[in-house]
Amino acid sequence: MKALLVEDNALLGKSVQRGLQEAGWIVDLAIDGEEALYLLQSSEYDVALFDWMLPKRSGLDLVRHLRATGSELPVLMLTARGELADRVEGLERGADDYLVKPFEMAELIARVNALYRRAAGRGSPTLQLGELSLDLAAARVSRDGQALELTGKEYDLLAALAAKPEQLLTRSALLGLLYPFDMEPDSNSLDVLLARLRRKLAGSGVEIETVRGKGFILHVV
């Protein structure tokens, strides 16, 4: 699960980033609207958190841009503007939820998780692939009704590939989904992760093909 947090208050931004990371999220942090727009165009996210008042481009502008381009990315607005008219404007412009500062970290995490579950349920909340069943809302995988124990990164990798079966996903695209934008994982980290996942999927009717020099494809056999 990957989130984009846009907050120009460095102390608050780092605090929220750390809280979300402790809750299991991968979090990219931007400090202004232009940086946020670049990240939105460079990576894929499950949820976005926008401060209303941002340098260069406001959170409201970012929401308008997303909706104008057809994006359904769930957006939580973070702001000190607590007046009813402001909340209504944010929601009418396309935000999905609204949290007024100061807030408790537990409430923010609960709202972000709720947005993620709601978005997962827009399509089929469950993917069936061979003997595997992926519960997207609960982030769980089962095999013939028995829970399959995966690490967070293993689940994220499987979910990314399972969302586009029989389609090529490049190495760079998968790395962008699995790690923060400003982090450079070890050169073989994806290969190690794939090896572990393949061992756990053996005999399940799901295979991950390596297309040398291009990327990876999930097949249901």
Image (cartoon, rainbow, N blue to C red):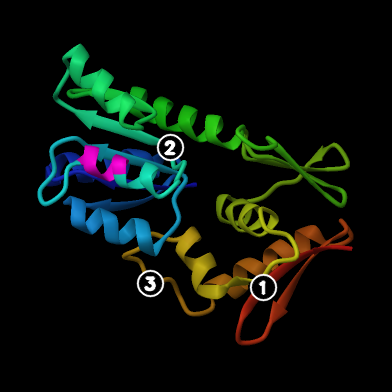
Marks 3 and 2, the one that precedes in the sequence: 2
The answer to whether marks 2 and 1 mark residues whose Cβ atoms lie closer than 8 Å is no
Q: Is residue 202 visible?
A: yes
Amino acid at dot 2: Pro
* Disc number for residue 216: 1
Q: Residue at x 27, y 24 (%)?
A: 99
Q: Which mark is residue 184?
A: 3
Which residue carries the number 2 mark? 74
Measured as percent of width and height from the top left, residue 6 is found at: 24, 46
Image point (38%, 42%), residue name:
67
Q: Is residue 104 found left or right of 119 in the rendered image?
A: left
Task: Tell me which segment is drawn in magenta.
Answer: 59-64
Type of the residue with mark 1: Phe
Q: Quadrant of residue 47?
A: top left
Q: Count residues near mark 1 (Cα–Cα under 10 Å), then give few for <14, some for 14-19, many for 20+.
A: many
Q: Secondary structure at mark 2?
A: loop
Kindly identify the amino acid type of the residue bearing the numbered disc 3.
Glu
Q: Where is residue 193? Give x, y as percent.
A: 61, 66
Q: Nearer the viewer, mark 2 or mark 1?
A: 2
